[in-house]
Amino acid sequence: MDTPPLEPPTHPDAEELSATALRLMARGAADRRAAFHTPTLSTIGLDGRPRARTVVLRGIDVAGRVIRLHSDLRSAKIAELRRDARAALVFYDAGAKLQVRAEGTATVHAGDEVTREAWGRSQPMARAIYAGDPPGMPLAGPGPDEPTADDGEANFAVIRCVFDRLDVLSLQAAGHRRLLLRWEGGERTAQWLAP
């Protein structure tokens, strides 16, 4: 019996790969069980060193390329972004074998309509977190098991990051593929890169 010839592996084209990345980002904002729901945010520390932490993706406007995060106004990342607005987020989905790095410029919102709207949509448990001690403050013990106050709105901030670069890495047995998307002057370009 003759064995059929092996078919060459098929890979997504640039449009398919970019659409998959953006779809997974949108799902990450909508579904707290999705892998992209908790990306890593990187900033430039006040001391010039890179800083990275896991954050929760609260929203995304794919057409506007805006990623929305919530933060405590007293956290180090807020001071860092106010000093240098450049930011990067790394998303990874092990099941899809896809990594997306989004780079752009962040804006911190506090005490404005953006934060009031986000605060109004927040659950009571999430609101109470902002009423506690400032993030990173030394404590004598592990701290309270449950925040008890709902007066943290003054400490609540929204970070809106407009990305102008997406580096999409697809890790496949048939061969890895890496695509760089850039937006400049309203135009989007796509460039394949060595993985």
Image (cartoon, grey):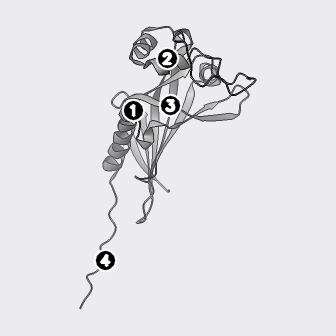
Name the amino acid type tagged 2: Arg
Residue drawn at the location 33% of the way across and 30% of the way down:
63
- Mark 3 nearby-residue class (10 Å; few <14, some 14–19, many ≥20): some
Which mark lies nearer to you, 3 or 4? 4
14 to the left or right of 102: left
The residue identified by callout 2 is: 127
Q: Quadrant of the N terminus?
A: bottom left
Tell which circle, 2 or 4, labels the residue nearer the N-terminal end: 4
The residue identified by callout 3 is: 104
Label 1 – label 3 distance at C-alpha: 18 Å
- The correct choice, above or below, for 33 with respect to 69 in the image is below
- Mark 1 nearby-residue class (10 Å; few <14, some 14–19, many ≥20): many
Name the amino acid type tagged 4: Leu
**Image coords of residue 12 (percent x, y):** 33, 55
Which mark lies nearer to you, 2 or 4? 2
Residue drawn at the location 66% of the way across and 35% of the way down:
50
Secondary structure of the residue carrying numbered label 3: strand
The residue identified by callout 1 is: 29
**Image coords of residue 133 (percent x, y):** 65, 17
Residue drawn at the location 34% of the way across and 59% of the way down:
11
The residue identified by callout 4 is: 6
- Mark 2 nearby-residue class (10 Å; few <14, some 14–19, many ≥20): many
Tell which circle, 1 or 3, labels the residue nearer the N-terminal end: 1
Which mark lies nearer to you, 1 or 3? 1
Secondary structure of the residue carrying numbered label 4: loop
